[in-house]
């Protein structure tokens, strides 16, 4: 592989990428509602002379066909979260209760930069580059939506798929690994039923607030007692809601659970345990009605191809050095990215881009600010270092592709 | 006391009362929003030739001065609840999510009927009758609002105050008692603070969902372990809410509690225990911030005057017979009615009107409907028997007053 | 009724009673093991010239036939508890882990004193006096044992039965009431089954320690949520035991529960709820085996005859004055005394003797001792004031009987 | 390395080893009470012409000095557990409540066999072989006891230390790994204090049974919420004991916890969390006294030397083949073995010997026996397959040493 010398020209376009990033950050849109975001990306791609193609309501793809050679699909996700930003950044969200708290704006800005570099330096590579901007990663609906809208027949079949994600890891570093790097994720909405009554007459009720509380505590035992201590499993009750008045005992409670696993057998056992515990607690309370379980946001395992990861890691290491490119430990989060290569039946690799300056947060803390450690993804304080993260992520995007297209 | 012979004429006006009741039932209004209700009552009172006087935004009073004699204040409350009606009645609520689930429409209709009967039969009594239609009983704000708006200087000072409430007790019966008949009630909004994080990274969070669950279970011990088993105390968590997404651990949880007691020392101990438990559970979890406590909807004890109760009970018993008028056991619910007589420094009595036909519910259950026993106040199924409850409540209202005004 | 003038001679025998009391206190014996106690009582009664008759292994009766008149049975219980005394008294228990922590030694000493007074003053009364010393009240086995051993055929059938109990109430007072004065009591041993494993391999276990913990918390809701707040019910988990090593997960847990109620319907509902909760929690945990329930120590309700209570209360009040004899509030504890009158089909009354000096405990606390309030029955600190409790209890015992026998 | 040809003679001595194993199994002795066991081993070693040396009360060592070469220490533990055997074996424990439920009898029998083989074939190797029989592994007291008794000055300093453990893994296999293979283990006895009272008077108590239950449930969150899902941690409440009578609320509860970790930082955080939770729950309950924490049975991490493990694994693989010798996954259990090499400052390796036939247990289950899967260590059903486990363990013991001593 030759190094992509044209990366030297990245400096000239970084301000443009920074502005694009800040614009997305100021204007976050929830999953499947990325209309403005799609328009902005479409406009930029069109400005570059490309012909972006909408796939699904809010997703889009730009294909650069550039002679013989492999076909590489690079994917960035573009949706934001229902979080109220509390970073204090001058480009903080201007949309109430919505925030790019997972860095998808950085992914989009980096991919856009990579597209421009590759497009303006077609003589340096050959093959086909597909830039895919995917909506709705957060609820596992976006990759499916693009596939359902005919993705596999609308673009050339890639040989490999690549994606990256900013993480609360040291800024300036890139982390890669073969095998499972992101967990399988399952969400379930559980409704438990009691019997409503006046708050002063508990004996006429079956109190769903108490049932929900018991369930929450009992669910902890799935990880603490039922899972092999060396095995990975997370059961989070992200939401527990019941009632709206102090003096009315409600007739139901609703729990939203999220499960993360790295192994199919563990996943199935955890889900079975959730149902067993919920049913048992309802019986214990004498609930008048069976609980209900509605599964949603079900994410596949992200399981990097050893070959693709090796190729990408080697190229990144050659370019950035071994100080920068390090071995990733599997992340606890989940992704729907792998739905895309799965739809084509192709191998893939997915890597992490460090984007937080731990010292900054320690200094803030010493100065009396309440932050503790680096704010994780989905936190109201999530604020990746724009520089040099954007630059590194753009370069990584180019180099990963160039490992295949650079000849 | 002579019997109020004019009660024979009640039959002639009952259809009018029934229509008024159904109209209120179809058009329930939340506490402090009883504008339409106030207008309707005002219109009816004006039709009767009276000059109703608005006191506070949504309360009103009609005074019938009728010669020498005692002054009796009779009060009906008029607000509804944020409950979605599920009675299937043909006059069910037409307002989404709002329902007369506590029978205040019945109280208003009965008081209106009593006003008409007394007004049309002025020759049968002498003294002053004050019909007070009070808003916002449910949140303990209405009596206060009327007092704050100058109630005590806007109407004659009564000698006694009377009120009644429909209850899930056998229809056709009236229940009276001296001493405490309704509990003191206190509501408190508790916010506990954790640290938010991505649902897959619980180790970066302090999970407020778990804190809230522990608190809910631990609060049960205030009644089960800390209260003398012979003492009355209720601690209800009417609402427990945290989070909105399965995969985001929220940074706080909110609990709405309701406390009922019959004794000041017990009340203070229970409240102290709530705060101790909440603080202890927050410390147990390593919560990053102290919990907060905001008290609201604080209801006084309803403690019937022995003299007034005796007078009223004797009159009711003489009229209805001992089969109908029975000894009440104190109710677990609370009322802000006693704020009114307290503002005047006068004695009062408050009684219960049975309004449910248990057999009807048993039959429904045998027929496969899910109802269990009689639906209590604040239930979506709360449906007092219109007949003969309205008739009995109207008569009781008249007789209670007539015991003082009948000469 | 004439007053029993011979009570003036009580002073002369009080030292003898005190010594007897201290001797029993120093030598407590557990339920059904009261061999030494029985011997001591037998010896004293024989010294008085009576012919005590053993009934059941550790119970006994002395009958004084004294001409025509009613027959009165007076009962004292004599067993102690598995409590380690911590009173610091100079006559504290000399038996490791056993203590008269419920005052049965006082009951026996008072009854013995009454027997002597009545025996030595036969000319002052006529009829039959039966002094019954009952073993094993603490586990509800003693009255049954005496009945099973032929009590009803071995002694004359009494007209009334009387008993008394020292209580953590003000010393110098006696408390009486008609109707229910002591609750029904039920004990149950619950065994829940998990699966044992090495402590480091929780995933191979079903952890019964966690099941038991969940059950304990969930049981609180029977009183806090399922029982009418105005209704009396206690559910105590007096013992919860599982495992013996930190690193072995045991295969079962054992809970000992105690239930107190004043109403049969409540009692049955509470017991049904206990079983429902235990079964539900076992299912919730995936327990490999059904839990088991073994009921024991089942105490009847103590429900005083209105007539007997009136007679006794009148006699006590006449003698002691209204300052001393007051209305009792029902006690939360239980008794098997009523099994005895039930076996004969006769009415009975049971009263309380105050025996604690609250000021003493306050002073101790001010002085830095850890006591809080008066130590209740079954506490390691339970220490009735010997004087004047013994004197008053002896007099009460005589006066209660004299109300029937005094002519 | 040459293969130890003399292993062919193992067959001839296996019956002797089997008898020795069964004798130990029938006569298990608790930690630090292994007097009979020590005598038996001493007798056998003496029979072999060796001069065993007692070190500490119940430990012993046999040293075979055999010319120039490395010094290898091989260790077997010899203590049993307070478990009631339920295997039904014809050589089951004859000591009530004590059982070799962790296979130490197998370790001793295998080491004894290895000693005999090496002793009788001195011409096949050169160097020094130290067979160390260690008491009290189960409570982490035995290695310390031998070191405290001067182990390091009483025997030659070894170059490496070796040990092995039978495990509920497939019989016929050996499992080795470099790095951490056994966790650090900490036990703590926690006493929480309430206030005792009669079971019918919960309001006079602070109920320690409820406090303990809350603590048990809350402790689950240390693993489920506070520990990185990819990190190893176990918090087991092996024993939770409070009270002995249904109707006496006890004044304290005792919990025995066991903690397993693979990382010092995690270990410290877990222990801090335990103390925080226990203190918080005591405050939540209004406990009258601070809880106490007594740490015991604190086991070090077993962290195999990469070099030693490589040497041993290579030798085992060469002898047994790759089918038999496999990569171990770290075990959740703990060991005090590493105290011994730590005392000398030498590297070590520790491996696992599979000893269970899963099919046998499945067959038993199909036939209606209650066993589920293979019984883990410390289970009353723990029963390693005597054959061929004893043979393989003896060979492994010899080969591990021979890798150093075989020249």
Image: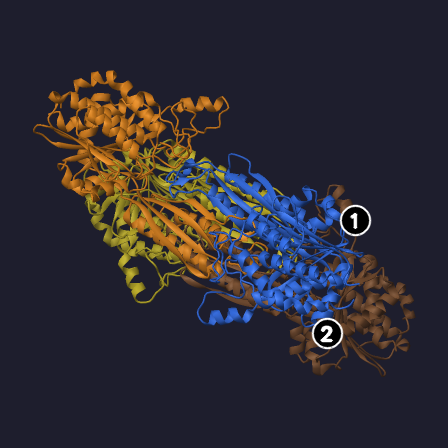
Chain colours: A orange, B blue, C brown, D yellow
Tag in front: 1 or 2: 1
Work out which quarter of the rendered image holds the C terminus of chain B and state it. bottom right
The answer to whether residue D125 is seen in the rendering is no
Direction from residue A263 to residue C178 in the image, left or right: right
Task: Please tell me how crowded label 1 is: few (under 14), some (14-19), or many (20+) other residues with Cα within 10 Å.
Answer: few
Dot 1: element? helix
Direction from residue A57 to residue A188 in the image, left or right: right
Chain label for disc 2: C
The answer to whether residue B91 is seen in the rendering is yes
Q: In the rendering, at what x and y percent does residue D271 appear?
A: 48, 38
Q: Nearer the viewer, residue B368 or B126?
A: B126
Above or below, C385 relative to C112: above
Whichever of callouts 1 and 2 sits on the residue coming sooner in the sequence is 2
Give the residue pinned by disc 1: C360
Q: In the rendering, at what x and y percent does residue A178 appear?
A: 23, 35
Give the residue pinned by disc 2: C60
């Amino acid at each position: 592989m030759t190094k992509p010398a044209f990366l030297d020209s990245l400096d000239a376009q970084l301000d443009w990428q920074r502005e694009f990033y800040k614009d997305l950050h100021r204007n976050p849109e929830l999953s499947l509602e990325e209309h403005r975001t799609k328009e902005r990306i479409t406009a930029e791609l069109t400005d570059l002379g490309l012909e972006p193609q909408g796939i699904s309501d809010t997703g889009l793809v730009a294909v650069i066909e550039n002679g013989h050679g492999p076909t590489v699909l690079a994917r960035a996700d573009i949706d934001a979260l229902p979080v109220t930003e509390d970073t204090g950044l001058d480009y903080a969200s201007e949309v109430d209760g919505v925030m790019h708290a997972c860095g998808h704006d950085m992914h989009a800005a980096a991919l856009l930069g990579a597209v421009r570099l590759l497009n303006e330096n077609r003589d340096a590579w050959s093959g086909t580059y597909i830039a895919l901007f995917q909506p709705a990663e957060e609820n596992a609906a976006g990759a499916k939506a693009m596939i359902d809208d005919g993705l596999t027949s609308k673009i050339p079949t890639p040989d490999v798929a690549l994606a990256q994600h900013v993480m609360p890891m040291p800024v300036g570093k890139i982390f890669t690994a073969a095998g499972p790097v992101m967990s399988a994720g399952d969400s379930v909405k559980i409704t438990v039923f009691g019997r409503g009554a006046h708050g002063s007459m508990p004996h006429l009720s079956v109190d769903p607030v108490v049932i929900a509380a018991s369930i929450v505590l009992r669910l902890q035992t799935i990880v603490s007692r039922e899972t092999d201590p060396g095995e990975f499993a997370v059961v989070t009750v992200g939401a527990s809601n019941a009632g709206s008045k102090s003096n009315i005992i409600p007739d139901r409670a609703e729990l939203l659970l999220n499960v993360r696993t790295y192994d199919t057998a563990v996943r199935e056992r955890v889900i079975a345990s959730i149902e067993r515990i919920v049913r048992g607690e309802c019986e214990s309370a004498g609930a008048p009605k069976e609980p209900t379980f509605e599964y949603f946001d079900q994410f596949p395992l992200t399981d990097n191809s050893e070959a693709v990861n090796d190729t990408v890691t080697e190229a990144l290491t050659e370019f950035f050095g071994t100080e920068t490119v390090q071995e990733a430990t599997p992340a606890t989060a989940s992704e729907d990215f792998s739905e895309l290569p799965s739809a084509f039946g192709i191998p893939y690799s997915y890597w992490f881009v460090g984007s937080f300056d731990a010292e900054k947060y320690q200094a803030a803390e010493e100065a009396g600010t309440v932050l503790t450690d680096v704010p994780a993804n989905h936190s109201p304080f999530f604020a990746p270092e724009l520089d040099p993260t954007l630059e590194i992520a753009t370069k990584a995007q180019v180099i990963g592709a160039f490992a295949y297209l650079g000849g």
